[in-house]
Image (cartoon, coloured by chain):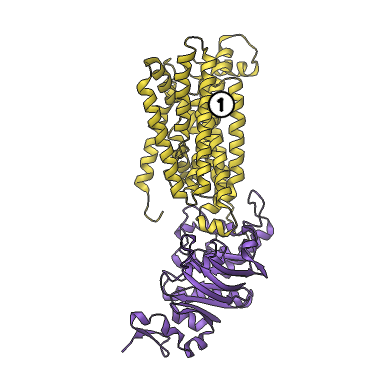
Amino acid sequence: MELQQLCIGYAENRQAPLFGNISAQITQGKLIGLFGRNGIGKSTLLRSMAGLQPLTGGTILLAGKELRKYKPAEIAKRLAFLPSHPLHVPGLSVADMVGTGRFGFTNWMGVERAEDKEAIRQALEVTTLTHLASRDSATLSDGELQRASIARSLVQDTPLILLDEPTAFLDTGNKYKIVRLLKELAQTAHKGILFSTHDLTLALQICDLLWIMTDRGFYAQPPAQLIQNGLLDLLFGDYGLVFDRNTLNYTFKI
Amino acid sequence: MEIYRKNPSYRLYYLLLFILLVLIFLAELMFGSVSIPPGRLFDALLHPKGADFATTILWSLRLPRACTAILAGSALSVCGLQMQTLFRNPLADPYILGISSGAGLGVAFFVMGCSAGMAGTGSAWFINTGIASAAWAGALAVSFMVMFAAKRLNNNMSLLIFGIMIGSAGSAIISLFQYFSSASELKTFVLWTMGSFSNVVGIPLGIMTILVGFGLALAVYNIKILNVLLMGETYAKSLGLHMNAVRNRIFISTALLAGSVTAFCGPIGFIGIAVPHLGRMLFKNANHKRLIPATALLGACVTLFADFIAQLPGSGQVLPINTVAALIGIPVILMIILQHRPHE
């Protein structure tokens, strides 16, 4: 997937896009983190890339063809999107929840054939949820539910996965677990994965590439390069914060 | 390895509900103002051409009435279930988008117009057919308005508010009609709002069966999208669903179901909101593959039972079905509210 001079925002303010001039690409096998302050447009960018929201400018190429020329169902075959805050659905088993990701594969009744069941089984195994398959999904912890959502996007069997803040509300252990899972999926299943996050330290340690959205523009660079170029200082300068290269985190400017 | 726990209890529940339905059905046929003993009942069932008292009561009154109750019960329950899932709102019911107000408005028009134009000439058949057609027209008009609005509103919550507003507008106009109508017109209308399963015989019953059948078939066709909708609109869209097409599919089914029941039986409340919850509580499952058949069966049982009670067997009196349905439905709704846990 390639973004060319993308402008994102809402149709009502076509003159003043939320964020402009984004050029980058996602390649299979790479894990990419998306970082930026609240309200800068991370979710909007992800939603635009998933075809859920029209662009205000620029183009997105998906497998060489313009995204807006795809039918929604065709996009769903190439790209899985995980909205932020997975919903608790009382009464829906984990296997059934994950199974909804097979939407594009099952017949009109949603009957799961052998290959659908195999895909679900594999996804549960990869996300270490096999033992919870028949549990009510509403009883899962936040970390388990997030893994179940990832399993749900895995059964969609797409080369690309976009995740909106998959590590929100998780404890440190679960954050690392989720991000390591994403890294493994990128490497072993050869998927292109982009996730937005507020955990910079974590993202710097594990991502192949980091996209940062700052008030001065959009940058897509490997973590080491971002640090070297001092671009991370751009993010929270207004808040009186500077990036500390030793702790890989922000500290007060002294 | 099998990831699904094979759960035979579903089939057991279905079977038990079905047996229960058959038992209530037989009770409904046997008891009423006059009791028909089992021997006579089976005899009359096997020989519909018989001219005796029991056969006549059975084939022209009780059998159509029981069938109507079963159809109405499953239709309203499945309709309510779809509305609750679409709007992710446990208090949604078949009439939340104003279908019953539309139907009521149609009936109010008809009752007023009928008495003004052809006082005294209308037979019971004419009045029943007229009421059903007028109610259908009203329900359909409201459904089309909602579908039209749905195209412009991309947010389900706004749509819900739109539907409730349409409903309120309809009720307001109905009140205006009532204010200016005569006592006899008022009675005809009020009787309609109380609901009844006893006027659907012969061709109307056939029409209702076909319409409800289509509505239920569509609901089965909707199972897959309803399951996806449980996880939110954004997710549904990301799977490639057009929300507009999804809503229309659900609206066509719900309009057929709620519209036909309201047209032929009047606005039957409570069944449509209470039974889906009853289904979820009994089956402990939110998968519509289980819930749609479960609510259809449960709805049929509950409605048939309510109708059985409404006839006050042995007394010759008949209570309005809505009153009895409400008396059964209210405790269920209260129970749900009291048990509503925050994380749900």
Above or below, B121 against A6 in this view is above
Does residue B92 appear in this view?
Answer: no
Query: SS at mark 1?
Result: helix
Q: As drawn, is B255 to the left or to the right of B274? A: right
Residue B201 seen by the camera: yes
Which is more toward the observer, B67 or A160? A160
Q: From the rendered image, report the letter of the chain displayed in purple.
A: A
* Image colour assigned to chain B: yellow
Name which residue type carries label 1. Cys
> In which quadrant of the rendered image does the N terminus of chain B lie?
bottom right
Residue B238: percent from the left, percent from the top? 56, 60
Q: Neighbour class for label 1 at 10 Å: few (<14), some, many (≥20)? A: some
Q: Position of residue A87 (x, y in %)?
A: 46, 58
Q: Disc 1 marks which residue? A: B67
**Which picture quadrant has residue B221?**
top right
What number of labels is visible? 1
Q: Is residue B190 above or below residue B141?
A: above
Q: Nearer the viewer, residue B237 or B80?
A: B237
The residue at the point 36 percent across, 47 percent down is: B339
B26 shown above or below B164 = above
Farthest residue, direction left: A254
In the figure, A253 relative to A23: above or below?
below
Q: Chain of mark 1?
A: B
Q: Position of residue B340 (x, y in %)?
A: 37, 49
**Quarter of the image holding residue B93?**
top left
Report x, y in % for residue B334.
35, 41
Q: Give the residue at x 37% y 52%.
A: B341
